[in-house]
Amino acid sequence: MKEMKPKPNPSLPPQQRKIRGFNPGKLITFPAQVLEPIKHYLLHQEKKLNHRKDSLLKEDPFTNPDRLNDNASIDTDAAEQFGHARSQALRQEIDKTLVRIRKALTRIKLGRYGLCENCGRMIDTDRLAIDPSIQFCLSCQKKLQSKEEE
Ligand SMILES: [Zn+2]
């Protein structure tokens, strides 16, 4: 008859699972097997967005160097103007997302992934699942959004 080995690490005692406030000494971090796919996803997104930005830059009539030298601002074609504005707006959106992705990657490196950038509390994992580059917890997000709208 085989001897029963003691089961390693049953369920953690509740006090270790609870996250109360922000305590840098006792951060609950995500295990590597959870972080790895997130990291891959973020790196993949970063690559994709950089490609997208490059192609937008090529589409933008104003970033064409010949176009710039050929000072035609007076009779700028409306379509070109629109194309430029659209391309620029899209690139700005991409830049914002890229910043968020890089910040999320940095947080993974520092072992702070999933923590709100504003208050340092854990972000709801459901929200992280929807957007892995999310920066703020729900209450901070709401606060920041209402500030922006003011
Ligand atoms: Zn927060």
Image: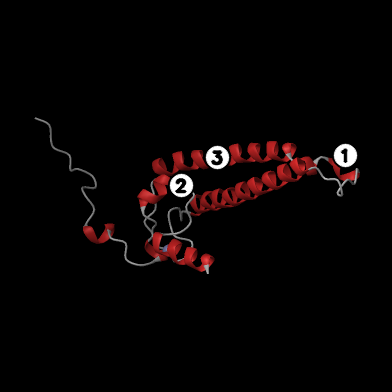
Which element is circle 1 on?
A: helix
18 sits to left or right of 79: left
For the residue pair 27 and 75, the one nearer the viewer reads as 75
Q: Nearer the viewer, mark 3 or mark 1?
A: 1
95 sits to left or right of 138: right
Residue at the right extreme, as displayed: 70
* Label number found at residue 109: none
Q: Position of residue 8 (x, y in %)?
A: 23, 44
93 sits to left or right of 130: right
Q: Is residue 27 above or below residue 32?
A: below
Total labels: the figure holds 3
Disc 3/disc 1 C-alpha distance (Å) = 32 Å
Disc 1/disc 2 C-alpha distance (Å) = 41 Å
6 sits to left or right of 99: left
> The N terminus appears in which quarter of the rendering?
top left
Residue at x-position 46% and y-position 47%: 132
Which residue lies under the disc numbered 1?
Answer: 66
Three-letter amino acid code at the position of disc 1? Asp
For the residue pair 105 and 118, the one nearer the viewer reads as 118
Which residue lies under the disc numbered 3?
Answer: 45
Which residue lies under the disc numbered 2?
Answer: 132
Disc 2/disc 3 C-alpha distance (Å) = 11 Å
- Whichever of labels 2 and 3 marks the residue nearer the N terminus, that label is 3
For the residue pair 21 and 8, the one nearer the viewer reads as 21
Q: Is residue 42 visible?
A: yes
Residue at x-position 40% and y-position 59%: 138
- Whichever of labels 3 and 1 marks the residue nearer the N terminus, that label is 3
Circle 3 residues within 10 Å: few <14, some 14–19, many ≥20: some
Q: How is the image coloured?
A: secondary structure
Q: Nearer the viewer, mark 1 or mark 2?
A: 1
Which element is circle 2 on?
A: loop
The part of the image, by quadrant, that contains residue 130 is top left
